[in-house]
Structures are given as structure tokens and as C-alpha cells.
Image (cartoon, rainbow, N blue to C red):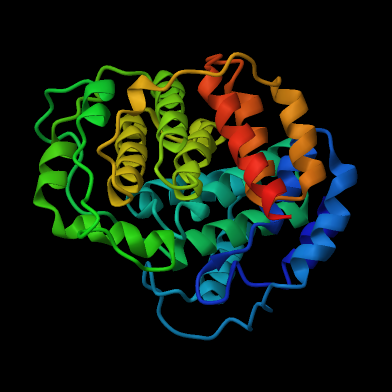
């Protein structure tokens, strides 16, 4: 993995105006799954579409300024001066309010980077943490409204009654991170997210419940569910980062994840009966899904299948397996 990461670190975290560089995340996911033999060919294929990382320029930094190289250099210096653990612990409270960065890929890349570094610390893996943090900071994107300031609804009820945008209100922008900006203009969305009460939940329990909700959102989408699958992988991505979150910031984590999932759901027309999803008669096990995803070479399929394989033992909900199967079928169908 280290050798592959060195190749990716010559490239920018984004390309083509806002697409996310999934390569380092997929390589780490394959390593987590014990399927590293698939990583080199996928790396070769991915590098063909990426853009080089420019030299870091001098100048001030501002969250969301899209100065990727400058932010990466900033976090590289902080890690060299302190440690990976210290910098991640300090950065998370700063970055959580902008969790939608790169359609949540800032968070997701950091999760993969930290998990890979924890498994086998090395200079290359520390550099990957710097790239992930820099990506998140450069594309920092806050969401409108405040979560849980007028708490009266439990998580299930708040999500089930969340008002989605009408077709006329929805954005036709090409990037997910731009489409969610449409909820800025929906006061009823701001009012709805204020009602959720996340205070009494443990963060681990919240993540299990939210990832199951996110899977149902994806499965009951009127489209392919591609945008909504990020609600699953982003929620699951928080778990490896929990050791770096102070106890006093746990509620902030739950609120940030809720905000992101609710925004993804509402921006793509969230008024759907996702609670009524019925599982099929049979589903493959998570290991079979991971192997099939690795063979498919689909970056989202791999990341989703590996996330499901980690979340399913904690809460064996068939919606998780079904969501991974749907994305795998989409990738195979496109190839």
C-alpha cells in the first residue's frame, strides 16, 4: 500500500473541476478486506484520469478556498511537528462543520487514511493523512440550518418526516456537493433538522442506526441511488475516527453526520417511504460482495462493500447488503 500511496501523492485530491480522487481510499479498503492483490491494477487505471498536484504556493489559508496543495503542506508540517494522532484530534473539531466537503469525500478519505495508518504506521501513510486533511479543509463546505436546537423528535421520526425538495426546487448541478446547496433556499428543511434530538444516543449506536437509514434511503431512491450511497459510506467513515474525538465533541459528530445525511436525502427529493423497504428473499453475504466488488474495479462499489462488511456485524440489517448489491449491479451494468 505504501508504494501505491506514493504514486497517488503525486496527484491532486480532486480532478476535472471537483471529482474526487478515490484511488487512495480504494487501495486502503482493499487492504482492509485482505484483497490487496487487486490494488495495483486499479491504481494503474485510476492514475490515468487524475491530475498532478501542483507546488504549494505561499499565502494565507481559508477553509473552503480549494488551495489543496497549500493545505496539504500545512498539515504535513503540523504532523511533522506533532504527530498524526495529535493533528487528527485537533483538526476534527475544526473540519466537522464542513463535512459536506467534496460530497463527504474529505471525511471518507480521512477515515481510510487514519485506518491505514493505524494498521501500519509509516511515512507514506502519515503523508496520506495530510492529503486527506488538506482535501477536507480545501473543500470545506458548511450546510444551512442548525441541527437539534429545538429537539423534540427521535432520529427515526426526524428522518421519516424530513421534507424533501420538489422537482422544481432541486438543483440540476453536476456535482453532488453543489446539488445539496439547494436546501439553503428551503426554510422548512431548516425547521425540520432543528427538531431532531440526538442527545441521549451513544455515537456508536447512532452510527449503526443512521447507516441502516441511509441504506434504505439509497434503496428507495427514484434514481440510481448513487448520490445517496455517500450517506452510507460517510456515516460508516466516522467509526474509525471516534478514538480521536473527545467526549465533549461526540454530540457534535452526531449532529454533523445527521446534517449531511439529511441534506443528501432532501436535496434529491427526500419525501419517500424509505421506512417501508422490504428485503428480498435472499442476499449474498458481505464477504462475497466485497470480493465481487474488488473484481468489478468499481471504486464506489469497493468502498461501499467494505464499509458494509464492517458495519453489518454490528447491526445485521439486510438493507446494508442490498445497498452494496445494488451498487455492484450498477457498476457491472455500466461495464
Q: Quadrant of the C terminus?
A: bottom right
Whether 187 is drawn above or below 171: the answer is above
In this rendering, would 300 be left or right of 293? left
Q: Nearer the viewer, residue 146 or 289?
A: 289
Whether residue 165 is visible? yes
Q: Residue at x 27, y 30 (%)?
A: 159
In the image, residue 154 lies at what x, y percent? 22, 20
Q: Report which quarter residue 81 is drawn in.
A: bottom right
Whether residue 81 is visible? no
In this rendering, would 106 be left or right of 39? left
Q: Residue at x 43, y 68 (%)?
A: 174
In the image, residue 242 lies at what x, y percent? 49, 32
Whether 68 is drawn above or below 328: the answer is below
In the image, residue 286 lies at what x, y percent? 69, 24
Q: Residue at x 59, y 13 (%)?
A: 281
Whether 163 is drawn above or below 133: the answer is above
Amino acid at each position: 500500500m505504501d508504494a501505491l500511496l506514493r504514486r497517488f501523492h503525486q496527484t491532486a485530491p480532486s480532478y476535472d473541476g471537483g471529482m474526487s480522487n478515490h484511488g487512495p481510499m480504494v487501495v486502503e479498503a482493499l487492504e482492509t478486506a485482505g484483497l490487496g492483490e487487486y490494488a495495483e491494477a486499479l491504481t494503474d487505471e485510476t492514475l490515468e484520469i487524475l491530475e498532478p498536484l501542483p507546488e504549494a504556493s505561499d499565502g494565507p489559508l481559508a477553509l473552503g478556498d480549494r488551495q489543496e496543495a497549500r493545505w496539504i503542506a500545512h498539515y504535513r508540517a503540523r504532523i511533522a511537528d506533532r504527530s498524526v494522532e495529535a493533528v487528527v484530534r485537533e483538526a476534527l473539531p475544526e473540519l466537522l462543520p464542513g463535512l459536506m466537503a467534496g460530497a463527504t469525500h474529505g471525511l471518507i478519505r480521512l477515515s481510510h487514511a487514519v485506518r491505514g495508518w493505524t494498521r501500519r504506521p509509516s511515512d507514506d501513510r502519515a503523508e496520506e493523512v495530510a492529503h486527506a486533511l488538506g482535501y477536507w479543509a480545501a473543500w470545506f463546505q458548511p450546510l444551512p440550518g442548525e441541527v437539534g436546537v429545538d429537539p423534540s423528535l427521535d432520529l427515526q421520526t426526524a428522518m421519516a418526516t424530513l421534507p424533501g425538495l420538489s422537482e422544481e426546487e432541486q438543483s440540476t448541478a453536476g456535482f453532488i456537493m453543489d446539488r445539496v446547496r439547494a436546501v439553503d433556499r428551503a426554510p422548512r428543511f431548516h425547521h425540520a433538522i432543528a427538531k431532531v434530538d440526538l442527545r441521549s444516543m451513544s455515537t456508536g449506536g447512532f452510527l449503526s442506526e443512521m447507516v441502516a437509514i441511509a441504506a434504505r434511503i439509497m434503496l428507495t431512491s427514484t434514481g440510481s441511488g448513487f448520490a445517496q450511497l455517500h450517506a452510507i459510506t460517510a456515516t460508516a467513515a466516522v467509526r474509525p475516527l471516534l478514538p480521536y474525538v473527545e467526549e465533549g465533541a461526540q454530540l457534535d459528530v452526531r449532529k454533523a453526520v445527521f446534517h449531511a445525511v439529511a441534506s443528501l436525502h432532501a436535496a434529491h427529493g427526500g419525501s419517500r417511504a424509505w421506512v417501508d423497504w422490504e428485503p428480498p428473499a435472499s442476499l449474498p453475504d458481505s464477504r462475497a460482495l466485497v470480493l465481487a466488488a474488488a473484481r468489478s474495479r468499481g471504486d464506489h462499489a469497493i468502498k461501499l462493500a467494505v464499509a458494509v462488511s464492517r458495519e453489518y456485524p454490528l447491526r445485521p440489517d439486510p438493507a446494508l447488503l442490498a445497498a452494496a448489491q445494488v451498487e455492484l449491479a450498477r457498476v457491472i451494468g455500466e461495464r
